[in-house]
Image: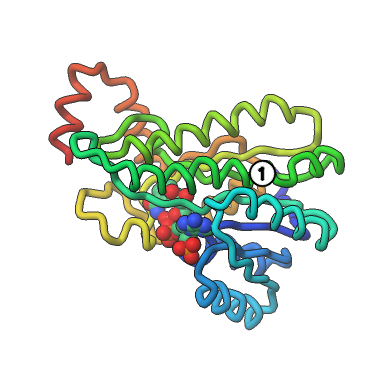
Amino acid sequence: MAEQKYGTALVTGASSGLGRGLALRFAKRGTRVFAAARRRDQLQSLAEEAHAAGGTVEPVEMDVSRTDETIARIQRIDADCGGLDLVVANAGVGLDTNGRRFDWERAKKVLEVNVTGAAATLTAVLPKMVERKRGHLVGVSSLAAFKGLPKNAAYSGSKAFLYIFMESLRVDLQGTGVRVTCIHPGFVKSEMTAPNRHPMPFLMETEAGVERMARAITRGVSVYTFPWQTAALTRLVMALPDFIYLPLARRVR
Ligand SMILES: NC(=O)c1ccc[n+]([C@@H]2O[C@H](COP(=O)([O-])OP(=O)(O)OC[C@H]3O[C@@H](n4cnc5c(N)ncnc54)[C@H](OP(=O)(O)O)[C@@H]3O)[C@@H](O)[C@H]2O)c1
């Protein structure tokens, strides 16, 4: 399948990890990238790195959990740049939430970024994209979307939301010219996975993860799971009956 080129793109969570890698990768290939996150210094150094490589990254200091501000800001960017071709809702937080000592504040942080933040990001200029009959929405979910993992009620639930949200949008947007891609990474090295003490099977280097995600986006894949080994393991776990899954999952953590 031919690789899609984008004139303009917005990537959230671009101050580190997968989002930073994606922003840089698209900028190096000629896309004008609006890189959004809360940490301005990291965004500035990304912009400098892109500039040195001949690309354009414009830092956008933004907290996606402030959904009204996020929507207004993305709409302004869209109007000023002549229309965003690609919007990647990548910003995410991975705080665990133990069901036995449930901490609502932690869960709320996860939901505000991964659910309402992502939904606001993805739909801010959707009516404009439909009007223009072009555009590409990308949500960065997780393989954790497919099974309720131990101590992950908020995170697994938030990523399952994104998967279904994107699927429903994909149904509605058929024939409009607006494409919808949902990406489900397994374990990839980043600030999010660095503190993990539990096993991370088939952990990938950041650059390798970014490259796979970028290719799935430019090829317009609807749902992309990677790496294949963890995706296969996930499918296997999904097929397990509760009498096997529940005690097994309890022992893993
Ligand atoms: N790494 C993995 O193994 C893995 C696996 C499956 C899915 N994912 C998903 O991939 C995405 C990227 O994660 P990563 O691994 O690259 O982790 P990361 O390095 O921790 O990046 C997370 C990004 O999200 C941004 N962010 C967090 N809260 C935000 C907020 N309120 N407003 C705006 N930006 C915010 C952070 O920037 P600031 O702190 O500067 O705001 C940062 O740029 C996430 O959605 C994650 O759930 C990752």
Task: Locate residue 209, reporting x and y percent.
Answer: 46, 55
Quarter of the image holding residue 175?
A: top right
- Does mark 1's beta carbon lie closer than 8 Å to ligand 1? no
Foreground of the two, 110 or 233: 110
Q: Which residue is mark 1?
A: 137
Residue 40 appears in the rendering:
yes
Does residue 251 sit above or below 12 in this rendering? above
Pick the residue in front: 203 or 40. Answer: 40
Specify how the rendered protein is coloured. Answer: rainbow
Task: Say above or below: 138 vs 42.
Answer: above
Q: Is residue 56 left or right of residue 112?
A: right
Residue 216 in the image, given as x and y percentages of width and height: 59, 46
Measuring 45% from the left and 38% from the top, which residue is drawn there? 159
Q: Secondary structure beneath disc 1?
A: strand
Q: Residue at x 34, y 46 (%)?
A: 105
At a point 82% along the width and 62% down the height, the residue shown is 80
